[in-house]
Amino acid sequence: MTIDHAGSERARTRLALTVLALCWFAILCDGLDTFVYGAVLPRMLADPTLGMSPGAAGTVGSVATLGMLIGALAAGPIADRLGRRTAIVAGVALFSIASLACAVAPSVEVFAAARGVAGLGLGGLIPTAISMVMEYAPRGRANLMVASLMTAHQAGGILAPGLSMLFLDSRGWRFLFLLGGLPLILAVPLMLKFLPESMGYLLARGRVADAEALARSRGVAVADFVTAPTGRGGASSTTAHRIRLLFTGSRAITTPALWTASFAGLLLVYGVATWLPVMMRSTGYELGSALSFLLVINLGGIAGMLIAGQVADRVGPIPTALVWFALTAIGIAALSVQMPLAATYAVVFATGVWLFSAQTMVYAGAAAHSEADFRATAVGLTSGIGRFGAVFGPWLGGVLVASGTPRWGFGAFAVAALLAVAALVVVFVTDRVGSRATTSSVRERVSL
């Protein structure tokens, strides 16, 4: 079957937008699940039927992120064995069922177990969805498509407090988790019908006939999705070999520094997502205002993704992340002081602009400091190490609230932002030294 070039490009664009839309909804659900717990937490703490203490609340938050850590580490092998489409659909189904279990949980222990299972489903969604979107993106639009995809996480963060403000008083916190089961009814059937399997997965598994049938059904060419091998190592290299490459030359310094920045960044993201309403109430704001701050910080996150991407295209992801984390530290510290409401909203929005996109730039920096043969390993490990911060952040907030010092959370999270700054300064200086050494070496060879 012969497909004209223009028609193939239009068909590929349609296919890319279909994949983006379905994966965007999956990540939206990820964001909703991440932020809904923090949005309803004040009401859960006041519910005598559940009997949740602030310390237990922090532990529950960490259980969920621990599940995400395990899910993220397992996502690659599962997707490679069963397919990316299967991994995405299974993840959405798993966290939807777990959310329904949260809605009817009779005790803190059952609720925590359900949150952990939800984390397993959620953990692998972002890396797997990014892989799918990048693979099907039109030529030259992969970064734009991924940036668009990642706005879904912050959109979920906006939806969580928005739904809480609508239903929390009238329906209670359990109703919000009941809504988390809707993707099982709405998203899974659509994905099973319209989400294609990864063309790269089919070809890598030797299922050429299936790949050709998929291409014909969507009006595209298989050749559009075939990438040339990069050479050194490639698919035949072992995981251990790819990890060793992360510690060769200057990467022996930059890799641990990037892991540290990722740990601090996700500590911030998940700690703030879980405890911001509680911390804002400790400074004198009512619950309604505290929930609206969670909505505003995620609006800032959406704007920040688009701004940071453009800035990073000009100056690079590491300088961008460095400055963004420094500004995040200032913003979080400023929130510990009660200001006029308009000023507080402005600071919360600006903090969202800097916070969420700073962590995204860490991932971009990890990709820039690796080569094609081990780039997936580099970014995957940077994300995986960061998940330990995602586990620690909610726990830390719970300890501070349980000790009667929730306002100290602002200082603790500001310190985490400064830790990321320090780690990225190490990366930046190492890069500059390496660049000067390379330039000097070139000049010496030229003079000879």
Image (cartoon, helix red, strand yellow):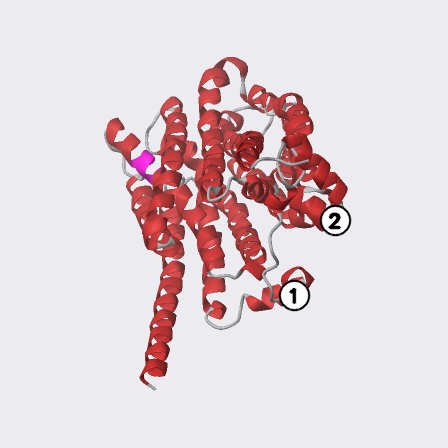
Quadrant into which the C terminus falls: bottom left
Horizontal and vertical percent position of residue 336? 31, 40
Name the amino acid, label 1: Ala
Residue 52, quarter of picture: top right
Q: Secondary structure at mark 2?
A: loop
Q: Which residue is mark 1?
A: 240
Magenta segment main secondary structure:
helix
Q: Is 327 located above or below residue 232 in the figure?
A: above
Q: Which mark is residue 205?
A: 2
> What percent of the width, then of the height, locates residue 374?
58, 60
- Horizontally, residue 109 falls left or right of residue 298, namely right
Q: CA distance from mark 1 to mark 2?
A: 22 Å
Q: Is residue 357 magenta?
A: no
> Can residue 221 be seen here?
yes
Q: Secondary structure at mark 1?
A: helix
- Image position of 49 with respect to 115: above or below: above
Query: Magenta stretch?
Result: 347-352
Residue, x 40% and y 35% (percent of image)?
302
Instruction: Specify the amino acid type for callout 2.
Output: Arg
Please report the residue visible at 27 percent of the width from the left and 38 percent of the height from the top. 337
Seen from the viewer's position, the closer of residues 312 and 206 is 206
